[in-house]
Image (cartoon, rainbow, N blue to C red):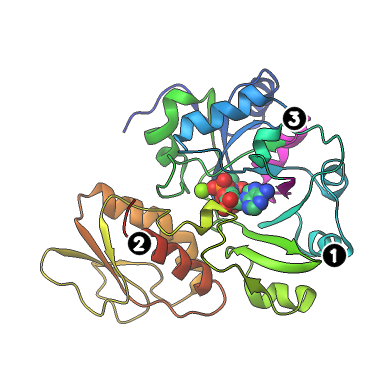
Amino acid sequence: MIVSGKLVRADAGAIAPAGEALRRGGLVAFPTETVYGLGANAFDDNAVAGVFAAKGRPRFNPLIVHVRDLKEAALYGEFSDMARELAAAFWPGPLTLVVPRVKDCALSLLVSAGLDTVAMRAPAHPVAKALLIEAKLPVAAPSANPSGRLSATRASDVAETLSEHVDFILDGGDCPVGIESTVIGFDDGMAVLLRSGAISRDELEPITGTLRTLDKSHIAAPGMLESHYAPRAMLRLNAREARDGETFLGFGPYVPKNISNLSASGDLREAAANLFAMLHKLDMSGAKTIAVMPIPHEGLGEAINDRLARAAAPRP
Ligand code: TXA
Ligand code: MG
């Protein structure tokens, strides 16, 4: 693993220079409650373009802009009553809201990739919050991983893949949730689930009513692309046992102790937190095919199964 001087513990002494780097147009990787983000000044086209270049995104997909709170978000996006209610209920936290850009919006057009909407969320992680306060800027940040690959939940994973492109990697330990934010958009005032994620459908539907999902022909979010979040190894899902040459990834109590297990107690929250780190570890160990046990499709299981299905999808 390549660790450079850029990987620093995210204490008060590191936040100030990281905020300064963002203001100068640099890139800073930082922990959020979901996954690590690769941050840039959301006003600065060059800095945002640097994010696309660092990730090797094949085209300009829109990015999530991280803000301190709804008051700041409302400077850049138009919030309907339902959008406000969702922000009030879940911010700071792992919910991203896609709303129309305000007229003469000061954010770089690149963060919206040409759309007239902008995705925003207020993260809950103390390091992300401190960085936003220090930078005094909205921060555009996709997950801190090369495009199409596994999201990073540990600073060392970011260091392995993106070191040369960033000014700083703030190490705030493992991301507690471990799976990306839920992305909600609006169509004719109705909420649409653009990407399942850390906030489950059952938590949202009391506010949104039954959530529609987009059909596959309508790719509004790259998180909706078939192959995404992919390790190098192939994945076989709903596996009951490992076949010859496969590496097993278990879930629940009936898995031998020496086998990787997303959650021995069958806890979906723990499984979400472990998902990317365990896939990454098995990938690094040289596994050719990872056979993954079935995960119940309830609560956070919807987001876990979504990521597994994409990781297993045929590669472009
Ligand atoms: O938890 C997270 O959301 C992490 C942390 C760092 O905040 N970020 C993250 O960003 O996962 P990224 O870029 O990997 O995923 C952003 C998702 C994509 O699926 C993107 O297409 C969607 O949000 N998105 C962003 N802006 C959008 C827009 N204007 N319309 C529709 N979808 C949008
Ligand atoms: Mg991503």
Mark 3 is on which residue type? Glu
| N-terminal label among 1 and 3 | 1
The residue at which mark 2 appears reads as 313
The residue at which mark 3 appears reads as 134
Mark 2 is on which residue type? Ala
- Nearest the viewer among 125 and 58 is 58
**CA–CA distance in space, label 1 to label 3:** 27 Å
Q: Residue at x 66, y 78 (%)?
A: 202
Mark 1 surroundings: few (<14), some (14-19) or many (≥20) residues within 10 A: some
- Counting from the top left corner in percent of width and height, residue 164 is at 43, 23
Mark 2 touching mark 1, by CB under 8 A?
Answer: no
Task: Name the secondary structure under disc 2.
Answer: loop
**CA–CA distance in space, label 3 to label 2:** 40 Å
Q: Is residue 129 magenta?
A: yes
Q: Which residues are magenta?
A: 116-138
Nearer to us of marks 2 and 1 is 2
Residue extending farthest top = 24
